[in-house]
């Protein structure tokens, strides 16, 4: 080793020790009679105390990579901001490993440089301690995920990443085959089919930190390639899988950032929509949605007649609600295809607002009683013939007001499972579509609806939600050939379709499929929660930007014509 | 859980216990008055003792996936071949989860079915216990690699797998970009450039179980996608890296298969060629190559005059050497572009063979003395103006005779490092080429040759070799801009070339590069050693065949025209 200690370790107990440190010149303070240099490596910063003559000889500048030998001495005044702030190293010898050109931005946590520039010089950006911390937190996720899963009998199996393209889900990235010109591999969107095959192969408990790919137009929180903690287990019921997810996430939070997650609540999809207006409710605050149909649908107000009427109460915020705010709320609600929302304020023990005059006064009293309204409270009401739509519109306002009122604390964690999702949805044209994938297992008690009312069937799907963010989703899979056949029929899939889309999996299902289920947890999403950042690129070492370009290497890039020729491909140039 | 114990756990201590088991029907022995069923899961086999009426009702067949409830009873006669052979389960209830069609081959370790069929039904092939064991051993590699590396301060960082295509090395797999039509990502052949960038980014100790890709014509021991334990570390010298490799491999062998590897020998590339005729010598046996130039180049035999003359002794094998065998040996040697080899036999205290008459008798006596020849020994001699060529030809014969004489024991492990490789090679046309990559650091003491005799420079490269197999290779990297510039010049790379080929890395090298180095270990190759198989497909869950096709899903496959249209690509159809 070219050092005998790192820059983050020395303390007052090391005084008089001879040390050899390696790192980068972080700051230089030239006091004339003495020069102080902060030497930085991955592990921290140590102050070097350098004679001017030595400093001059070494000709040091910022970000030079050097080795320094010397003796640990006690600092006259301790630097309380630095872990090693009690000591400094009186340097006797300096070796410059390599020089550095002036960096395009300072290597400090605070950085006002545009993200594009940071990505071009990512190797400098990653020297910033905050970025090192982000990479570290991400590395702890896979470390502790593996530790927990192995301890629970899961075996890591690598599934292929050059696979068959299927028309399911998002768009595949394609990889042209050279040996079979005109044919393509696809990069996996997830190891879904392979993990089900592994259960059929009797692998029992599988996991993988899987590379996944989606060729979508980029969103701020997505990357073309991402990683998933991917699991599948045989001979289980839903609660068995939920217990693994809960245990896994608790283990990761505890070990990676020292947070003890509370027990995970279970809530049905129907309740999540009814009470929170969201399939990923943030439970850090209450502000539940109330069904006031019984009071207001028959209150004299024509607009509510025969509708489902839903309400949320924003406590003590009547001062916030201007005409402008009401209009903004209306605009937000309308995004969810409702007619709009109405605001009522509780003032002097009575409700005020433009719609009050239309509502019978006894109904107003009932409303005050039911919602326990106090002076200063605001009620926002939404009515629609479709209850879910009204709730979802109010759910968006609920989230909005939680932010306005600062109810979302970053270090408050309220995890839950959303269960009992509908298996199917009926489209406007009457056709039935699957809410997840056609292998998702229905809840046993609902199987009888397969022949009568399929949209009533609940699925075994489960989502894991933390503070309004979906961390994971999964389901049990169908193992019964008869049920699978009926589901395919309901989805209107012909034998031809089935063969084309899932041929090899359906073939495999003939040979003794175990009851099984699993889940996938998005690593980047989880890392963002743990690192408390809203930027997915903060938890990816070399991310792509929103144009799916990696600005440092400038990829994707053009390739020589012989490279596409050998693949039997021609690039079509747009006609002018 | 749908079971309370697995099929591999029950013992005599569990007698009278009520158990619920899940698994697949492995065998059925219908004795009329009683039916015995072996139930198999990932963990083992348990014998079920089933009443004929119950058996009839359940209508069981091979590979049905079932649940069985019952009581553990002592077997009258223990089955010593089975871990659970002391007991059986007296079954009270059977539930069939799913039926199975007759399988195309029996689910047994012994399998005469063609590999192609096994790959089509890989989910059945993987049910065979031997395949489960292979997957398990492979999973232990990544598990213990991570355990060791994390304990040694390495941090796992995921580098991108959609990267820039570079003209280095083998052919890249390309991924067309949809957003920037006509441009391509490449899948990485290794994370080489990224791991050097991570060191520049001050990440200090990085590792990754990295997915790597090479679009090569398939060889029996290669897959288009493979995995690498990829490491890089800063502020180190060569021995520091070698110690990590040695520690890592010892840890994996110990924990995965209980083998204590001996300490790793170090041998220079020059010695490996001189004494073993190979850059990956198998050290499980001696049979060294002897330089007998001093005796035979001037022995009266014209054919050896002025040549380097090399010899190996095959002890006590003169009976093996027929005229036909000699011709075969000659053919094998000629593959290495030498004129051929000559055989001498030691019989009745004298050497015999066709060339004996050409050689002065005192030289023959010297040869007998130098090689300590005894009756029955065979000497094979090769002469060439290029010593290395003669050695390499004899090295191939050395390997061949070790197999013939059964000197290669599967459970004998002789690991070593081959060091001090040449940095450059001079091509026949006089140009200088790099033996590894242009960033490989020369050995400091040889730096002065940069200006005088570059082919004399030794590099810091190291290969890890186990029993004739290359498990790993690596090197220290150049951190000194001046040295890097000279190496580029010697390789005849223009500034343009450099920018095109490694632009972003060369830019990064300007900002304070630490002295650093690393290595990559092929996971499949290592898994083959641990699982004692010569077939790489035995240690890959869903492998490609020699045509780079995955026979189960039949990928690569054709894709709809709109999928290539959206990428701006046209498939060229061969002209007739």
Image: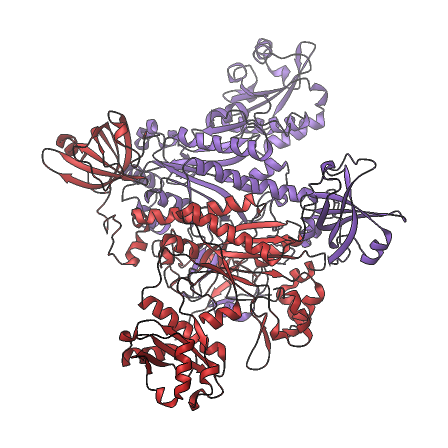
Chain colours: A purple, B red
Q: Is residue A144 above or below residue B567?
A: above
Can you see residue B326?
A: yes
Q: Residue at x 28, y 56 (%)?
A: B117
Residue A554, percent from left and from top: 63, 58
| Nearer the observer, A186 or B315 | B315
Which residue in the rendered view is the most extreme toward the right?
A: A32
Q: Is residue A178 above or below residue A395?
A: below
| Nearer the observer, B249 or A207 | B249
Residue B236, percent from left and from top: 63, 55
Q: Residue at x 54, y 47 (%)?
A: B149
| Nearer the observer, A292 or B573 | B573
State left or right for residue B394 relative to residue B238.
left
Residue A202, percent from left and from top: 32, 42
Q: Quadrant of the C terminus of chain A?
A: bottom right
Q: Residue at x 51, y 49 (%)?
A: A214
Q: Is residue A212 above or below residue A15?
A: below
Image quarter of residue B288? bottom left
Q: Is residue A507 above or below residue A464?
A: below
| Nearer the observer, B266 or B469 | B266
Can you see residue A189?
A: no
Image quarter of residue A331? top right
State left or right for residue B117 relative to residue B529.
left
State left or right for residue A459 relative to residue A249.
left
Image quarter of residue A136? top right
Residue B16, percent from left and from top: 24, 24
State left or right for residue B12 relative to residue A264.
left
Badge count: 0
């Amino acid at each position: 080793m070219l050092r005998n200690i790192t820059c983050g370790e020395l303390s007052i107990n090391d005084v008089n020790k001879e040390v050899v440190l390696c790192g980068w010149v972080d700051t230089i303070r030239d006091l004339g009679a003495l020069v102080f240099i902060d030497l930085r490596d991955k592990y921290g910063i140590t102050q070097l105390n350098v004679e001017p003559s030595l400093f001059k000889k070494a000709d040091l500048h910022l970000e030079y990579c050097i080795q320094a030998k010397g003796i640990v001495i006690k600092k006259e005044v301790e630097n309380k901001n630095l872990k090693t702030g009690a000591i400094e190293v009186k340097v006797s010898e300096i070796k410059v490993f390599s020089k550095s050109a002036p960096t395009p931005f300072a290597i400090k946590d605070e950085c006002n440089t545009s993200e594009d520039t940071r990505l071009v010089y990512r190797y400098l950006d990653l020297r910033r301690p905050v970025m090192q911390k982000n990479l570290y937190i991400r590395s702890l996720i896979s470390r502790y995920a593996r530790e927990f899963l192995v301890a629970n009998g899961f075996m890591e199996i690598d599934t292929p990443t050059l696979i068959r393209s299927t028309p399911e889900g998002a768009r595949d990235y394609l990889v042209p085959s050279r040996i079979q010109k005109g044919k393509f591999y696809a990069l996996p969107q997830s190891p879904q089919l392979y993990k089900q095959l592994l259960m059929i192969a009797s692998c029992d408990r599988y996991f993988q930190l899987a590379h996944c790919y989606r060729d979508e137009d980029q969103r701020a929180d997505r990357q073309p390639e991402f990683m998933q903690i991917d699991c599948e287990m045989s001979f289980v019921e839903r609660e068995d899988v939920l217990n693994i997810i809960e245990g896994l996430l608790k283990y990761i939070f505890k070990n990676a950032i020292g947070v003890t997650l509370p027990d995970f609540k279970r809530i049905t999809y129907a309740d999540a929509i009814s009470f929170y207006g969201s399939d990923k409710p943030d439970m850090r605050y209450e502000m539940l949605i109330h069904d006031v149909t019984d009071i207001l649908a028959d209150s004299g107000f024509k607009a509510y007649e025969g509708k489902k009427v839903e309400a949320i109460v924003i406590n003590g915020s009547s001062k916030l609600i201007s005409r402008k705010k009401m209009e903004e709320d209306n605009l937000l609600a309308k995004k969810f295809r409702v007619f709009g929302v109405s605001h009522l304020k509780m003032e002097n023990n009575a409700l005020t607002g433009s719609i009050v005059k239309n509502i019978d006064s006894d109904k107003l009293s009932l409303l005050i009683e039911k919602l326990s309204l106090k002076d200063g409270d605001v009620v926002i009401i939404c009515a629609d013939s479709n209850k879910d739509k009204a709730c979802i519109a109010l759910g968006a306002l609920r989230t909005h007001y939680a932010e306005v009122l600062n109810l979302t604390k970053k270090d408050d964690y309220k995890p839950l499972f959303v269960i009992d999702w509908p298996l199917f949805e009926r489209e406007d044209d009457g056709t039935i579509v699957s809410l997840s994938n056609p292998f998702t297992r229905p809840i046993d008690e609902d199987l009888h609806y397969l022949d009568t009312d399929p949209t009533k069937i609940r699925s075994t799907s489960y989502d894991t939600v933390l503070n309004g963010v979906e961390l994971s989703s999964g389901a049990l899979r169908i193992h019964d050939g008869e049920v699978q056949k009926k589901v395919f029929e309901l989805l209107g899939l012909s034998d031809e379709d089935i063969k084309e889309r899932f041929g090899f999996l359906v073939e495999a299902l003939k040979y003794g499929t175990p009851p099984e289920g699993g889940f996938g947890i998005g690593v980047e999403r989880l890392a963002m929660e743990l690192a408390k950042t809203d930027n997915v690129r903060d938890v990816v070492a070399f991310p792509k930007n929103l144009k799916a370009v990696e600005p440092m290497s400038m990829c994707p890039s053009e390739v020589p014509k012989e490279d596409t020729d050998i693949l039997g491909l021609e690039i079509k140039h747009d006609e002018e």
